[in-house]
């Protein structure tokens, strides 16, 4: 019996010794770990082997190939961006502008832009060494264009069946759901019944619906109501994406839209929002042009503006949009971000362009310049037409996730919206730390658990043993956005380490050559 007890004691000591000297690929020590489940912090160490979190606790006696001392820093699940424009991912696979702001996972294909032939696209994307995890939505605009071009009419029964089949194939191929851009061509030509029919296909396979609303200005309330109707009739979870109130006449309307979201949720509809923390949007110059004028593509637009009667109508509607909608009632509100045919306009405004041409910067001349710009090939613009009060009110809502609506950008190329560099650190540094609008815990909830749950991710968004090692380490005292509307090309401060599937991609604030991102597929 004594020999048996001695043997058990020796084996126990051996196991304890083995555990004490186990080799991790990476250990993060002394950090303040964010508990996304309870929205709180606790002290501890994290051990990573391969692409997983393998241990959490006191790992001071353990060894690792790499040790990170996170004293004074928060260790958070990697941020999840549920509205990301990464159309340039094959050209910029490192996704530096996302990774450096702590984003490890994105949901791409928003605003109806997701690939129609999604599975083929994802198969190709998997051959790239990616810096971020990417999930994708199938885009209604892309699907409609594949089935019926940019025609301004309802689909035939046969065309609707083609669209439904494309959505069904995309869901089988890995789509997380369907996105719409009902403000844009050709989605603007779809009625609600078409959108419901396609959303039902996505819902049948566990998908979600994200919507650039039909209107975010004067028609905002109707746009929100339409999205709520789709949630009800398609039985699908809905995200009001980049939620805002555009144009001075609508400032303050978020009070009503949030009441509408709450009412919908109170009757059992799954309606949420995402939001970027800025008072300016960014989209194409064509958003100022009535959708009907863009039907059939650029050649048809040219024909319409060549006809004096039709041009007059287009001109009047553009003037209206400049005064009451995204134009913000001032040509100075429209700032050029990327103009291929006149690069010196980048960073300047519609007012600057009018003055350069010797024109009075009024709404009429502004409308003429919008038409001229579109005839030249269009442009990407920043529109300074959102009220700060609405930004703050939406941010405080428990069902509003943080999302950038940003694109893949690189220093010196164009004059992009600063959200592409600074969305997440701006919420942490400016709105949470400096303004005290929301707590740090609540801010992180909006960046981690809330979007992970919305996407249905079961292995990301939380720090737990066995989950994927997507982690962002930041200094809560210094984290902040650096880029501005005047000078956007700056990476944020205060985020020294970012880990994607166990790969240290940002080390000491600098991008490494490690690439841990993968393509995520819903089904």
Image: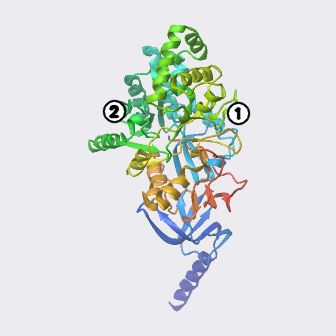
Q: Viewer-nearest of labels 1 and 2?
A: 1
- Disc 2 is placed on an element classified as helix
The location of residue 251, given as percent across then percent down, is 39, 39
Is residue 162 at all visible to an observer of this figure? no
In the rendered image, the vertical position of residue 196 relative to residue 277, given as above or below: above
Q: Residue at x 67, y 38 (%)?
A: 414
Q: Which residue is mark 1?
A: 344
The location of residue 422, given as percent across then percent down, is 58, 50
The location of residue 138, given as percent across then percent down, is 52, 32
In primary-sequence order, the first of circles 1 and 2 is: 2
Residue, far right? 513
Q: Residue at x 55, y 85 (%)?
A: 9
- Disc 1 is placed on an element classified as helix
Q: Which residue is mark 2?
A: 225
Q: Nearer the viewer, residue 61 or 71?
A: 71
Q: Residues within 10 Å of mark 1 (few under 14, many from 20)?
A: few
Residue, far bottom? 2
Q: Nearer the viewer, residue 37 or 413?
A: 413
Q: Residue at x 68, y 40 (%)?
A: 127
Would you identify the image quadrant in which residue 303 lies? top right
In the rendered image, the vertical position of residue 505 relative to residue 166, given as above or below: below
Is residue 400 at all visible to an observer of this figure? yes
Q: Residues within 10 Å of mark 2 (few under 14, many from 20)?
A: some
Residue, far left? 267
Would you identify the image quadrant in which residue 197 lies? top left
In the rendered image, the vertical position of residue 374 relative to residue 397, given as above or below: above
Cα–Cα gap, marks 1 and 2: 41 Å
Q: How many marks?
A: 2
Query: Which numbered marker is on residue 179?
Result: none
Q: Is residue 79 left or right of residue 344?
A: left
């Amino acid at each position: 019996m004594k020999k048996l007890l001695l043997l058990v004691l020796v084996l126990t000591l051996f196991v304890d010794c083995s555990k004490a000297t186990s080799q991790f690929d990476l250990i993060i020590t002394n950090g303040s770990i964010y508990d996304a489940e309870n929205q709180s912090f606790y002290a501890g160490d994290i051990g990573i082997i391969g692409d997983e979190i393998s241990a959490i606790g006191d790992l001071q006696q353990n060894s690792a190939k790499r040790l990170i001392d996170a004293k004074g820093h928060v260790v958070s699940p990697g941020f999840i961006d549920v509205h990301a424009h990464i159309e340039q991912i094959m050209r910029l696979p490192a996704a530096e502008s996302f990774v450096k702001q702590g984003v490890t996972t994105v949901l791409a294909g928003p605003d109806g832009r997701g690939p129609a032939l999604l599975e083929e696209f994802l198969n190709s994307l998997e051959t790239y060494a990616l810096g971020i995890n990417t999930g994708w939505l199938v885009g209604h605009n892309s699907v409609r264009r594949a089935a019926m071009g940019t025609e301004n009419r309802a689909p035939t029964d046969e065309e609707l069946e083609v669209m439904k089949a494309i959505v069904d194939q995309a869901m089988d191929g890995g789509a997380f759901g369907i996105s719409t851009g009902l403000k844009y061509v050709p989605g603007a030509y779809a009625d609600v019944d078409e959108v419901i029919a396609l959303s039902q296909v996505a819902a049948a396979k566990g998908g979600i619906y994200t919507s650039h609303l039909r209107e975010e200005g004067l028609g905002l309330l109707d746009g929100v109501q339409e999205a709520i109707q789709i949630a009800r009739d398609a039985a699908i979870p809905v995200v009001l994406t980049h939620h805002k109130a555009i144009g001075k006449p609508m400032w303050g309307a978020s009070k009503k839209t949030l009441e509408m979201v709450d009412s919908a949720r109170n009757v059992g509809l799954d309606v949420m929002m995402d939001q970027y923390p800025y008072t300016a949007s960014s989209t194409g110059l064509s958003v100022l042009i009535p959708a009907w004028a863009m039907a059939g593509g650029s050649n048809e637009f040219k024909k319409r503006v060549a006809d004096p009667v039709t041009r007059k109508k287009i001109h009047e509607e553009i003037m209206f949009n400049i005064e009451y909608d995204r134009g913000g009632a001032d040509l100075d509100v429209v700032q050029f971000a990327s103009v291929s045919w006149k690069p010196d306009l980048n960073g300047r405004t519609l007012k600057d362009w009018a003055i350069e041409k010797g024109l009075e910067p009024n709404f009429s001349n502004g409308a003429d310049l919008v038409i001229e710009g579109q005839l030249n090939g269009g442009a990407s613009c920043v529109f300074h037409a959102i009220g700060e009060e609405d930004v703050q009110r939406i941010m405080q809502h428990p069902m509003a996730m943080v999302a950038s609506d940003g694109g893949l950008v690189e220093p010196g190329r164009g004059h992009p919206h600063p959200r592409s560099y600074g969305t997440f650190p701006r919420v942490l540094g400016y709105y949470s730390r400096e303004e005290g609008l929301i707590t740090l815990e609540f801010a992180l909830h909006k960046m981690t658990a809330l979007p992970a749950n919305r996407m249905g991710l079961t292995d990301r968004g939380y720090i737990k043993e066995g989950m994927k090692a997507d982690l962002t380490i930041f200094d809560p005292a210094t984290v902040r956005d650096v880029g501005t509307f005047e000078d956007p090309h700056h990476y944020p401060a205060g985020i020294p380490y970012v880990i994607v599937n166990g790969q240290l991609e940002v080390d000491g604030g600098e991008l490494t050559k490690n690439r841990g991102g993968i393509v995520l597929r819903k089904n």
